[in-house]
Amino acid sequence: MEEIKCAVYTRKSTDEGLEKEFNTLEAQRKAGENYVKSQKHQGWVLIKEHYDDGGFSGGNMNRPSLKRLLQDVEAGKVNMIVVYKIDRLTRSLTDFSKMVDVFDKYHCSFVSVTQNFNTADSMGRLTLNMLLSFAQFEREISGERIRDKVAASKKKGIWMGGCVPYGYEPIKRKLVIKPDEAKAIKFMFEKYLEYKSPLAVSKLMEEAGMKTFARASIDRMLKNPIYMGKIKHQGVLYDGQHEAIVSEEIFKAAQNVVAEKPKKQRTCMYDKNEVGIMRGLLTCGCCHSLMTPTSSQAHGMKRYYYTSTVTKMYGHHKCTNGSVPVVTMDECMIKIVSQLFLDPKVFQGLLEKVAPNKSMELLRVLRSPERVFNKLSERHQLLLMRLMITGVTVNAETMEINWTDLGLSLLPDHLLQKTTGHQTILPMPFVKHKGRTEIHLPENIEVEPHFDNELIKGICLGFKYQKMLDQKKMSIADLSITENTDASHIGRLLRLTSLSPAIIRTILKGHQPPKLYLRNLLRKTIPPIWEDQVKQFGFTILD
């Protein structure tokens, strides 16, 4: 006699009562086990695996044990499914038809302990469909009845459960104000009307010793009509049975502020509006959260920045790293990564991966990897970057680049010297100069010249004043009267003539250290020995 492997499936729509010693799932399983024993003469054998779904609706197939059962049916571990009633298996005719297709395909049957029918003939199938139709009808009627009850209760101002709003606590199914939390809610509305910024409110609440909320949470709370004593249902507000925390006037004033703010356009991956070829690859070294593109608008111009998600949620007081302009970061990484493509064949092969049928056309026109990189679309630049880099950590003083195995194998010698494992640590290449963020890469990486006109002019004036003093045999005081300039300033400029010729040539070519400006150079003591000058002022390149 052929052995029939039987599995008992049990289900309950709610988790109420499942904590009891002998619950309904165990009762269903016991009935199923007894039924299998009664069919032992036909070769039925109960498998040890349990398939119990407690707290899951029969209106869909999104049930963990049911999914596991169907997988075992496909694997041939189950030939017969035993249920207490057919509605335990499903309450949906659509889902039932899907299950029957699976059962027929893998030669599996099912049986109900309390409902006698045989699906082998047309009358049995009709009976089964009628039972399932009534089960589905019962589920839909129950849903309509519950929805009507919720609507009627909300019209009376009764809170119908769910997430308890901050500032209240549920007592006998009624919202009651918690004084400490209600104080924080009032503070939140008052400060929002004053500063009109959720991030500012978050910072002020933290400084006041209150619970700190993320920007999105503050936005939701400011729009919640429960705080003015209303219950919302289907877009209509009803007077609630709970006490209001803020007045209706204050709540509406906050809504007016929210409505006046421009709506930000959301963009998705590879969307034409998405910016930044380093998105998804940057991590903030301060708060250890991802840095993602964000935008700001001032004077009619939109600017994009990589900002940590902690800063976005709570404000800049939670993260000291600040933001990095998207254009600057992308340009810097292109300069670094393009050095890996010294072999044209390797570069062509990588281009073929990310931009098929375009590599030959690009390489014919542009021989420089960096220029080819800039000609690619942002999507292709991002894909090419991900072939080389697994992530970049941005710290206050350094930038840590983590390479893929492919990227590591292509590193030039000067980058390998700064690499441990798969990580290269470089000094922070971004320097702010007169409100602009500029790129200053370390030695052995090609550096764009940066001509500091103020510094160059100061050195030229120093030599000019020295020449006038030598030729006209005049004092600094007389020179200050002639040039209508402060004598102490002339004295500081004259000290610049003692700089080494190599340092002066380097400054004139625009390769001075990024933090060397005329103002801080005039304030420092200039050593008489040229080698000491190089060390003190941080020159790594000398022309």
Image (spheres, grey):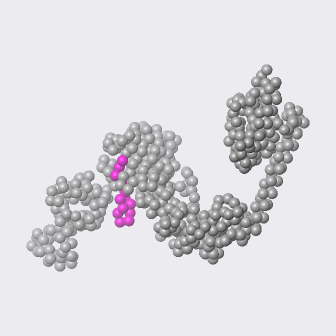
Whether residue 43 is situated above or below residue 355 in the rendered picture: above
Q: Which residues are magenta?
A: 425-438
- Picture quarter with the N terminus: top right
Whether residue 489 is situated above or below residue 525 in the rendered picture: below
Residue found at the far front of this picture: 21
Q: Position of residue 378 (x, y in %)?
A: 50, 51
Q: Position of residue 210 (x, y in %)?
A: 52, 66
Q: Is residue 434 magenta?
A: yes
Please name whichever residue, 534 or 444, is drawn nearer the observer in this view of the structure: 534
Please name whichever residue, 537 or 284, is drawn nearer the observer in this view of the structure: 284
Please name whichever residue, 130 or 111, is drawn nearer the observer in this view of the structure: 111
Q: Is residue 331 magenta?
A: no
Q: Position of residue 191 (x, y in %)?
A: 53, 72
Task: Kindly tell me whether residue 529 is visible in this rendering.
Answer: yes
Whether residue 488 is situated above or below residue 520 in the rendered picture: below
Please name whichever residue, 85 or 338, is drawn nearer the observer in this view of the structure: 85
- Magenta segment, prevailing SS (helix, strand or loop): strand
Task: Kindly tell me whether residue 57 is visible in this rendering.
Answer: no
Residue at 49% over, 48% down: 382
Residue at 63% over, 75% down: 247
In this image, 30 relative to 419: left or right?
right
